[in-house]
Image (tube, rainbow, N blue to C red):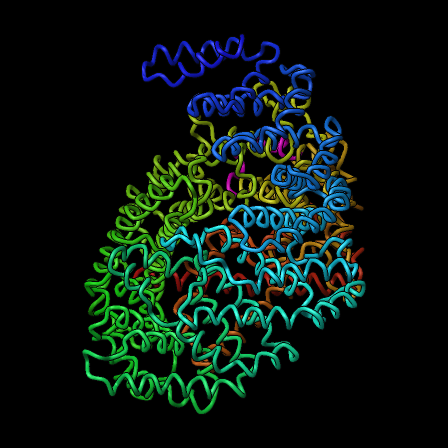
Amino acid sequence: MDLPSLAVILRAALSPNPDERKAAEDSLNQFQYTPQHTVRLLQIIVDGNCDMAVRQVASIHFKNFIAKNWSPHDPEEQSKISPADKALVRENILVFVVQVPPLLRVQLGECLKTIIHADYPEQWPGLLHWVKHNLQDQQVYGALFVLRILARKYEFKSDDERTPVHLIVEETFPPLLNIFNKLVQISNPSLDVAELIKLIYCNIISLHLELTGAHLFPSQLEIPKQLFDSNLFNAWMVLFLNILERPVPEEGQPADPDQRKSWGWWKVKKWTVHILNRLYTRFGDMRIQNPENKNFAMMFQKSYAGKILECHLNLLNVIRAGGYLPDRVINLVLQYLSNSISKSSMYQLLQPRLDVLLFEIIFPLMCFNDNDQRLWDEDPHEYVRKGYDIIEDLYSPRTAAMDFVSELVRKRGKENLQKFIQYVVEILKRYDDFPVEQKPYRQKDGALLAIGALCDKLKQTAPYKSELERMLVQYVFSEFNSPAGHLRAKAAWVAGQYAHIEFSDQNNFRKALHSVVAGLRDPELPVRVDSVFALRSFVEACKDLGEIRPILPQLLDEFFKLMNEVENEDLVFTLETIVDKFGEEMAPYAFGLCQNLAAAFWKCMSTAENDEEGDDPGGALAAVGCLRAISTILESVSRLPHLFGQIEPTLLPIMRRMLTTDGQEVFEEVLEIVSYMTFFSPTLSLDMWSLWPLMMEALSDWAIDFFPNILVPLDNYISRSTAHFLTCKDPDYQQSLWKMISSVSFYNPATCHLNLVDESAIILQYDIMSDNNLEDGDIEPAPKLIEVVFQNCKGQVDHWVEPYLRITVERLRRAEKPYFKCLLIQVIANALYYNPSLTLSILHKLGVSAEIFNLWFQMIQQVKKSGVRTNFKREHDKKVCCLGLTSLLALPADQLPVEALGRVFRVTLELLAAYKEQVAEAAKEEEEAEDDDVMDGFDSDGEDEGDGSDKEMGVDEEEGDDADSNHLNRLAARVDPFILFVDTVKVMQASDPSRFQNLTQALEFQYQALANGVAQHADQRRVEIEKEKLEKAAAASS
């Protein structure tokens, strides 16, 4: 197809007539693989006589075609673009990318990115030569543009993959320096010069990061070795300092503030400060230098750090004189100054100008200003968002000013704290002297911000810490009724910062609390939000909840009115604090709270889904906060199980939707809710069981990282609704669990299948996963789930014992992590406890019984140099092993020979003694901790009571921790290992006296002593258990 015909088709693709447009698109698709089609598109894109709309359509079609076809994803697929056409495109696109307007250059830049990533250096070895050559002639812009794309090819690559960057730096840094030097010497430079300097900066940073891997390890920031040459580095620094010192041209600056900060010369200024800050961060502190960098760092500090400081101070004088500096530039400059405070030589340079800096630049930045007032009046929601957005803090001059003051009083407080506080107090006093219509509200706002920002320092420092209450009453609480809304908001915020101090007059605390609560009904949105934030601190600090209890219903109403207006996670944090503080007293409000939080959650999710740019994380964070608050409510009413049935219909839609891929961002929080619902509900409804397949699908598909979280509700399903788990066939939960455990944890899903009808197929049809894509730590919950089945389904899952033992044994042979080996051995112990005869026969059938027991006993006896056991560290580990080994003792002589019997008997005694000692030690530590709490005057508020805690709900702690999941606690209630051991031995003694006699006579003295101790402890445990039963019965009847 010739050029005119192609242009006609491209024009038709813009037609408002859908039929014409469809026909044009079909034609483009039909001819796209014809020879030189891509070259013709490129010719139309660069043709200045062609209509711009047609050129734009051509550029988009060209970009999409290149992205799809230049380098096929399948290595075996042949490229649909001929080598000749590829060569022509590579030859021409470098020239054309400079000639086209910016609108089209963006599209060609994307094409270049695709081509460079696929072809450089192997298929395009001449690219670097072209860049170097054109950096030395008239095509400088094009060369810089292409170099930027080339440098970014190596972002986030490994050291080996970044090797080509060394040659790129060697070839391009010298010409970059020459170009930079020429540009700096131009008098009255145009905006095009700023664009070129900005491109040079971008290339320096990209090549610098790619060469050193600082994208991957920002804390290890280095500079290219070529710049360690002092003469070369000095040449660059002279140019940087020239740009830093040079005033930005006044001519051409946009009047609009948003456009002004993005203006070319201000961007150059920002990048200059940014580069120098990075150098100072890396080389400004001798304590963090590598030995090979120390000389360079000393040279940098001696020759440049002070000059940069001087330039930064001069730059700040612009705003002191009423001039303009972009917020980001101010922020970066103040970061540099903050980093200089702790360094003696830099602080000495700063000191002579410190008062001017502090009182004429820093403090005014902390004050409420015209932009704040405009945003407050025109868009209070945006005002609130910016005030609580941590991303905004990276650009905020006010945040940087607060950080500077905080760092100054922290590192150099002796000579500066009193001076600064005196200045602030003078402002507060002058404010009181003015009549209402003339009061400097904005200055007082800055003074209150300073007091709030320095709260940690003032709380610890005499004489200020003894004067805080008086200061609050005199200067802060009075502003709760200020005519200036921003001062009412600031008063609430400052009051919250100091809510935890010891008030000598509780009436002052009470007055502040009620003023903050009143702020929830303020007509100004920012005041209401800051009041909620402050309320959290007051609730935490409140010693008498009677102050809040009478107004709790109204308080909650105001909360949800505000949540309907603003999506802010701090609102939810405060609500969580209230719920946590009042505990079961929240029961009357639990249903309404969950309804409101569910509605708020859906609203936040809708906002997050509509935020295509992803530049406002507030909605997503608030959604997570809503789910956390729901969990807090569920925990607070855990002793009132009847409420869970009422709440379930409200939460089911959230659980169903968010257990799919739609909920990946909140998956952990949703699983916590599912865990509470499955643990505390009186019964598990069919609706709750409908969540099981969703979790299984997620786990098999994408949620393997959440396996420990999913373990908890699965455990609850099996242990609390065992009958349904065993009897339901549609869906078949037993088969579902097997499929998940075997495919996700042990098998290759493509080849794994189990036909329970034909038991011989068990041996033939599954295939152990040969690769180790999933490490031991990834699948620790799998053996725990098998344990849940064996412990809760005793006598009802005989057909599952062999398959589960097979995969356990196979995985045990490949296991490396000691803790994971312990878990796998415990599967075998649980199988023995489930049915010792069946389990032992399966181990014999598999030919692994000797191998397993030798490994097991070896692991039990393995100790560290300190004498501490290497394996089976937790109470639960020891207990399960005891139950499994004790179950073996019940087997007849033909299944457990005398030699094996003696060995098992001795090991079990040792484990029981260790278990008894560990339980006693834990009880002693718990008792001491309780005594400490009482002595310290702390009320636990139920946090450490067993009921409803994570420990009981099923969160299994890390290796070595004594926390057991809920099924383990229920196992403890059902069976005591000491009693089981003694009863089993008595049965042996009665059924086979000679065997028992031979066993006891062969026991060494130490084991006889252990046996007597175990028997005595078993009698003691019987008494304790009976006493606990009576106490529970009495409590239930009362």
The location of residue 966, given as percent across then percent down, is 49, 51
The location of residue 731, given as percent across then percent down, is 43, 27
Question: Can you name the residue that lies furthest to the front here?
Answer: 187
Q: Is residue 445 above or below residue 54?
A: below
Foreground pick, 287 / 340: 340
The answer, for residue 728, to whether it is visible in the render is: yes
**Quadrant (top left, top right, bottom left, bottom right) of the N terminus:** top right
Q: Is residue 274 above or below residue 938?
A: above
The answer, for residue 982, to whether it is visible in the render is: no
Locate residue 903 relative to residue 962 in the image: left or right.
right
The location of residue 1001, given as percent across then percent down, is 79, 56
Q: Residue at x 55, y 72 (%)?
A: 338
What segment is highlighted magenta in the picture?
Answer: 791-805
Q: Residue at x 68, y 30 (%)?
A: 769
Residue 560: image quadrant is bottom left
Q: Is residue 85 above or below residue 717?
A: above
**Quadrant (top left, top right, bottom left, bottom right) of the C terminus:** bottom left
* Majority SS type along the magenta span: helix
Locate residue 504 relative to residue 97 in the image: left or right.
left
Q: Is residue 867 above or below residue 635?
A: below
- The magenta stretch spans residue 796: yes
Locate residue 667 relative to residue 743 in the image: left or right.
left
The location of residue 301, given as percent across then percent down, is 70, 71
Foreground pick, 792 / 93: 93
Locate residue 583 relative to residue 248 in the image: left or right.
left
Residue 874: image quadrant is bottom right
- The magenta stretch spans residue 204: no
